[in-house]
Amino acid sequence: QVQLVESGGGLVQAGGSLTLSCAASGGTFSSGSMGWFRQAPGKEREFVAAIRRNGGNTDYADSVKGRFTISRDNAKNTMLLQMNSLKPEDTAVYYCAASRVSSVWYTRRFAYDYWGQGTQVTVSS
């Protein structure tokens, strides 16, 4: 059974940093893309960052470019999201996602087969 578990969320002041981690188990994820999405109260789940299977290709939402960095370790089936210079508008539940195969649509929700339960990130002003 495939399982994605996020960790590292919490409460931080504006300008601070957090590192989210996603641990994958029950499958092989090295062939697919992995990504982070977030959902704020009353809003739709939105793309944050994604990384292709080889780790060489990444993509970011405009709102987080230059502040967030995504990485993955295929040997350990883990993915990280380093978040710096956090803003109150970054407050949301952050979800980890993984796909069985790599896709050019890896910034889109429909490209992903598996999702974690989410971890709350709250940025105070």
Image: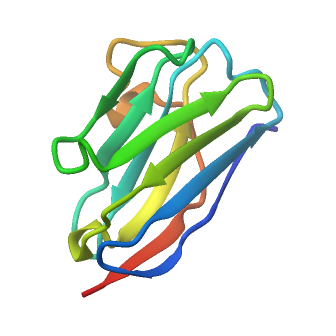
Does residue 122 lie above or below 99 as drawn?
Answer: below
Residue 34 in picture, x, y percent from top left: 52, 30
Q: Residue at x 48, y 50 (%)?
A: 82
Residue 70 in picture, x, y percent from top left: 47, 38
Does residue 124 lie above or below 71 as drawn?
Answer: below
Q: Does the rendering let one see residue 61? A: yes
User: Which residue occupies the foreground of this view, 57 or 109?
Assistant: 57
Left or right, 112 with reference to 32: left
Give residue 47's quadrant in the image: top left
Q: Residue at x 16, y 42 (%)?
A: 62
Does residue 24 lie above or below 55 as drawn?
Answer: below
Q: Does the rendering let one see residue 107? A: no
Residue 79 in picture, x, y percent from top left: 61, 39
Residue 16 in picture, x, y percent from top left: 39, 72
Query: Which quadrant does the N terminus fall into?
Result: top right
Left or right, 54 with reference to 65: right
Residue extending farthest to the left is 62
Give residue 93's quadrant in the image: bottom left
Q: Residue at x 54, y 62 (%)?
A: 118
Left or right, 52 with reference to 122: right
Query: Which quadrant does the C terminus fall into?
Result: bottom left
Residue extending farthest to the bottom is 125
